[in-house]
Image (tube, rainbow, N blue to C red):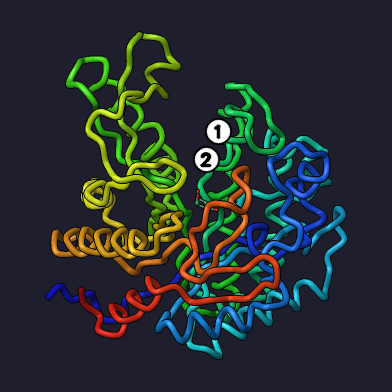
């Protein structure tokens, strides 16, 4: 049997805009109202009201941690206008988690921005860092005593590329220049946020917090062993997987590496152009693998390989997301089980892993894909907001109870 470490964190994640509902002051909501997206989030899972019920379920599933995000646009719907009642809401969320024995893992930026911030140019302007940092300072002062794990920014490169390069997320732009600028801006912002958070804990004489980012890591595998493919895989690995981590690590502003891992990218380049090198993938289903309902390859070995590659940074790792959207719950369990085996293999190989957080606790609003992809351990009936625990969630609960797989 494969034992997981003592004090291992086990839990699931959500993000405010995907579950809360009625986040009317952010840029996503605005784009949804303008019909720029497939679906509108509307009431989502009503998690803003139903969080105590959802956390009770998490507790019953033996979770001992929970990852969620604070919606900046609720706290500061207009510039400088901080809402005491919304701050109080998140204090209650954290208190509810704690009372149920769930360690909070708190994300400060998970893709959405207040509309007023986007109108001023959002993350394309370096001078706008100050607004986010003011929000960070405020929230961390409020929650410092109750929170140990912070994630400053979720998947910075996914955010910059989807919003400014691929143009599929608000503000739907197609500019390489802005993509690079936004990425650098987010790195600079993380570095400052890290220092602010640590400063507050020092001032308050609290035990040092654990501050990191959640990085989206992909397994870049080559289709045919050509020089182009090998070069492209190496380039993508450096650029998409490790560039951001190294940039902030270099400034000593990372206490752990948050890893979001889902899938494989099968590199197959047929010309030497930059787009080809950076993004072409095999179109012929060579080396086929089972897929999730969005067509992403299921490749658990990739998690092992990436974790082994992270070893050189000599930092603990927290799996901040790993999950599958599917209507077939047996496949979900198979996915979780096989990823946990690979996770254990990496632990046995000397990687320090703090915990495993599944994406997601409940089915939710999957950004530009709308509500159809179902990632949850818990099924949501969007007609009546009824929660039903899936079989896979109970199978995971058994593993957690035993602490082994
Ligand atoms: C991540 C993201 C989550 C969730 C998940 C599934 O990139 O952080 O918000 O949507 O992917 O696609």
Q: Quadrant of the C terminus?
A: bottom left
Looking at the image, can residue 19 be seen?
A: yes
Measured along the vertical axis of the image, is residue 52 above or below residue 293? Answer: below
Residues 19 and 145: in front is 19
323 sits to left or right of 121:
left
Locate residue 34: give its quadrant. Answer: top right
Q: Position of residue 195 (x, y in %)?
A: 55, 57
Q: Tell me the residue that label 2 is attached to.
A: 158
Residues 9 and 270: in front is 270
Task: Bin the neighbour count of mark 1 within 10 Å (Cα to Cα): few under 14, some 14-19, many 20 and up.
Answer: many
360 sits to left or right of 95:
left
Q: Position of residue 372 (x, y in %)?
A: 57, 52
Locate residue 80: give its quadrant. Answer: bottom right
Q: Position of residue 145 (x, y in %)?
A: 58, 81
Instruction: Answer yes or no: disc 2 within 8 Å of ligand 1.
Output: yes
Q: Position of residue 224 (x, y in %)?
A: 20, 21
96 sits to left or right of 43:
left
The numbered disc on residue 161 is: 1
């Amino acid at each position: 049997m494969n034992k997981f470490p003592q004090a291992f964190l086990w839990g699931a994640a959500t993000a405010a805009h995907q579950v809360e509902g009625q986040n009317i002051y952010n840029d996503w909501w605005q784009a949804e109202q303008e019909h720029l997206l497939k679906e509108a989030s509307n009431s989502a899972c009503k998690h803003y009201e139903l969080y105590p019920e959802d956390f009770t379920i998490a507790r019953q599933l033996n979770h001992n941690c929970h990852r969620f995000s604070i919606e900046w646009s609720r706290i500061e719907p207009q510039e400088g206008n901080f809402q005491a009642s919304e701050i109080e809401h998140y204090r209650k969320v954290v208190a509810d988690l704690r009372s149920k024995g769930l360690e909070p893992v708190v994300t400060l930026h998970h893709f959405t921005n207040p509309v007023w911030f986007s109108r001023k140019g959002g993350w394309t302007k370096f001078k706008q860092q100050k607004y986010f940092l003011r929000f960070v300072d405020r929230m961390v002062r409020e929650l410092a005593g109750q929170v140990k794990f912070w994630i400053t920014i979720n998947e910075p490169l996914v955010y910059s590329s989807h919003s400014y390069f691929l143009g599929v997320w608000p503000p739907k732009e197609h500019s390489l220049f802005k993509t690079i600028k936004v990425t650098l801006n987010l790195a600079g912002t993380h570095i400052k946020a890290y220092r602010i958070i640590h400063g507050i804990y020092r001032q308050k004489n609290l035990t040092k917090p654990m501050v990191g980012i959640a990085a989206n890591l992909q397994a870049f595998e080559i289709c045919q062993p050509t020089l182009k493919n090998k070069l492209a895989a190496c380039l993508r690995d450096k650029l998409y997987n490790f560039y951001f981590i190294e940039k902030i690590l270099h400034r000593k502003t990372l206490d752990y590496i948050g890893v979001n891992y889902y899938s494989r990218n099968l590199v197959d380049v047929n010309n030497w152009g930059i787009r080809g090198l950076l993004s072409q993938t095999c179109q012929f289903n060579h080396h086929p693998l089972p897929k999730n309902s969005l067509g992403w390859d299921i490749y658990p070995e990739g998690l092992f390989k990436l974790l082994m590659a992270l070893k050189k940074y000599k930092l603990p790792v927290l799996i901040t997301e790993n999950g599958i959207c599917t209507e077939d719950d047996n496949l979900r369990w198979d996915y979780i089980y096989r990823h946990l085996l690979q996770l254990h293999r990496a632990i046995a190989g000397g990687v320090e892993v703090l915990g495993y957080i599944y994406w997601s606790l409940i089915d939710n609003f999957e950004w530009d894909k709308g509500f159809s992809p179902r990632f949850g351990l818990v099924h949501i009936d969007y007609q009546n907001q009824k929660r039903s625990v899936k079989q896979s969630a109970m199978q995971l609960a058994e593993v957690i109870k035993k602490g082994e797989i």
